[in-house]
Amino acid sequence: MVTQHDAHILAVWFIRCDSAETSRPFSAKCLTSSDRPRFLAQSALCNKVASRCFPANQHGLDSLGRCFALRAAARGCTSAVLGRVFRLGRIHGLFPMRHPVRTYSSVNTSGNSCLNSWRGFVVASLGWLLKGLWLWCKALLVAWATLAIYYSNLPWPWLRLVLAGVFASFAIWALFLSRHRLMSPAAFVLFLGVVTWWVSIAPSHDRNWRPEVAVMPRAIIDGDRVRITGVRNFDYRSTNDFAVRYEEREVQLSHLTALDFYVSYWSEGPVGHTFLSFIFDNVPPLSISIETRPEVGQGFAPIASLFKQFELIYVVGEERDLVRVRTNYRRETVYLYRLNTSADDARRLLLIYLKRINELADRPEFYHLLTNSCTINIVRYANAAGREGRFDFRHLFNGLIDSYLYHSGRVNTTLPYDELRRRSEINDAAQAADAAPDFSQRIRFSLPTIPR
């Protein structure tokens, strides 16, 4: 068996033997005068090692042939490669064959060759995959940190833009272009500094809020009775012209009978806004919408919502406010579905909502498009209230959530989905009802799956 020490001894001598696999014959005469003594000494030592590994009476190899065989074995070559080496040796007259070389028919040479080729392909593919993933991770880190700086809490937009540009330029140069070995660690240290800064940004209740989100609601639960402060009931004249009015509402959990689900679209597509209405048999419905809490002059921005730009608020209000402003003034397309939820599950869900409302009133949180948003939180609280089901991609692409509700059996499925969706749009009914006191009843009058 060829040992690592044997292979090491042969290493230099094999360099000289490489010429045997080229078009020119191998000969010690081709060496320079300075190389010749060293080669002769190494050749004698390697011949001794090869003789020990491949005795002369085996395989019909002379000394040089044994060295070729040892070289092939040290490289893990197959017998097919050995055969090629022997043929090249005979062509160039490097070693005579004293008797025919035995073939190793017991070895599945084609199988071994295919196996080695497959292993090489897998290793190379894995290497490229890991390299690609590493490049993608570095690009993602640079992009995230650049946006984190741009959407940071610095009060001057121009400074945020300059710092973001400087960081992006340095990080790209250090991670992708520079050959200096200290540049990559420097870039990662700078990235950790940005992360530390970003983590230190805390949410607040003390900002110049827009009137629609200026008051945080709070719930006082006393057995069956629930009193809620900060219930929004604005009287709109246009999208930005309205009479501000926050009220108190009292409801009884025992009179909660059903749960309605709203889907609202700025434009038809995979993204929308969802919220719930809790239906009582003795008072008007109570709507709760999980939203961003923008400051004066701000509007919703999806990318900014990933970087602590908006606090979170649970807007509690009358449907004549929360629904009407969307259908009649913002001109959003709104769909209304009655969920197949028991009264007990609806009560548990309302109590979870009220608990979260009080938590937010005491301790502010940031809105996050992917982890702390409207539909994600609705699903999270429904799970806590007893929902059974797995995560679905339509929880994130909530413009498709009504498809999920239908195909999971959470709404009435007696109608085909397309027909149900068409008849669940309430814009015409809401615009006709406008500011009528019975707004909630009128928008439900023509819905196909809500009993009247």
Image (cartoon, rainbow, N blue to C red):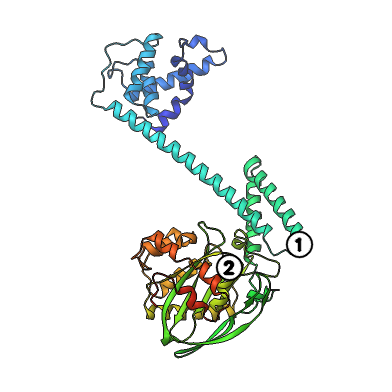
User: Residue pushed farthest front?
Assistant: 432
On the question of residue 152 being in view, the answer is yes
* Residue 65 coordinates in the image, percent (x, y): 36, 17
User: Residue pushed farthest left?
Assistant: 106
Label 1: how many residues lie within 10 Å, few (<14), some (14-19) or many (20+)? few
Question: Residue 113 versus residue 365: which sits nearer the camera?
Answer: 365
Left or right position of 15 against 330:
left
Label 2: how many residues lie within 10 Å, few (<14), some (14-19) or many (20+)? many
- Identify the mark at residue 232; answer none if there is no mark: none
Q: Which residue is mark 2?
A: 367
* Residue 226 coordinates in the image, percent (x, y): 49, 87
Kindly identify the residue that appears in the image at 33 percent across and 22 percent down. Answer: 80
Identify the image quadrant of the N terminus.
Answer: top left
- Identify the mark at residue 156; answer none if there is no mark: 1
* Residue 276 coordinates in the image, percent (x, y): 48, 73
Question: Quadrant of the rendered structure where residue 410 is?
Answer: bottom left
Question: Quadrant of the rendered structure where residue 405 is?
Answer: bottom left
Kindly identify the residue that appears in the image at 36 percent across and 19 percent down. Answer: 66
* Residue 90 coordinates in the image, percent (x, y): 36, 10
Callout 2: SS: loop
Asked if residue 34 is positioned above or below residue 133 in the image, the reply reads above
N-term-proximal mark, 2 vs 1: 1
Asked if residue 159 is positioned above or below residue 22 in the image, the reply reads below
Q: Amino acid at mark 1?
A: Trp
